[in-house]
Image: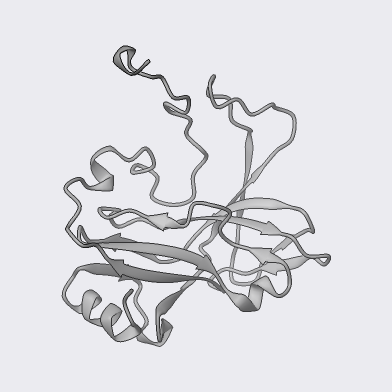
Amino acid sequence: MYSGADMKRAIENGQLKVDPYYEASLRPVGMVLHLGAELLKPLPGKTVDVKNRVTPDFKKITLTEDKPYELQPGEFVLGATYETVTVGSDIGLLLEGRSTLARVGLTIVQTAMLVYPGHTDRAITLEIVNNGVNPVLLYLKMKVARAAVFELKTASVTSYDDTGKYRNQPTVGQPIFESEILIEPEDVK
């Protein structure tokens, strides 16, 4: 795992790119990331069906400097980092929530915490849930997550941006259901 000093070197040599980059965001073993301007709130009324590619409809919410979003207890939204990130072929990035926000019930990452090598010049999607008992205001550019970087034993031979299904979403985007059900080859059965 990279220390803050290792992350600084990785940024200086282009192995990791964060834009905008603030050295003050570095921590002993990570970097703080901030909340971007767009949220997507899923709307009720549809049964999600991964096999038949049925996703919920979403309402777009835009945060501004003076207009936060009040996330209610039990409410879920998709968000994205304010920063765009590029992950080199010989590193991986793990995203996690912040302890300060977790102490009021806010979860930032449900399960998708790994950012693959080759993720290039895009925000990172956040899965935000208020598990607490009180509403929480979400502000543009608030400290929302921490990135931890680790070194791969060998560089990845493929880049996420070659085949990754979210490679064309520069910021927060709706889910894409693609090949979600295992189809076994005939010779495996």
Image coordinates of residue 36 in percent, x first then y, are 51, 63
Question: Is 143 above or below relative to 55?
Answer: below
Q: Residue furthest right?
A: 133
Residue 9: quadrant of the picture: bottom left
Q: Going 17% across and 57% down the picture, which residue do you hit?
A: 155
- Look at the picture and state if 28 lies above or below 33: below
**Residue at image location 62% in from the left, 69% down from the top:** 139
Query: Does 51 sit above or below residue 7?
Result: above
Lateral position of residue 68 relative to residue 22, left or right: right
State the residue lying farthest toward the top. 186
Residue 118 percent coordinates (x, y): 25, 53
Q: Nearer the viewer, residue 131 or 152?
A: 152
User: In terms of depth relative to the viewer, which is nearer, 155 or 35?
Assistant: 155
Residue at point 74%, 60% (across, down): 131
Of the 4 image quadrants, the one containing the C terminus is top left
Q: How many marks?
A: 0
- Res 15 → quadrant: bottom left
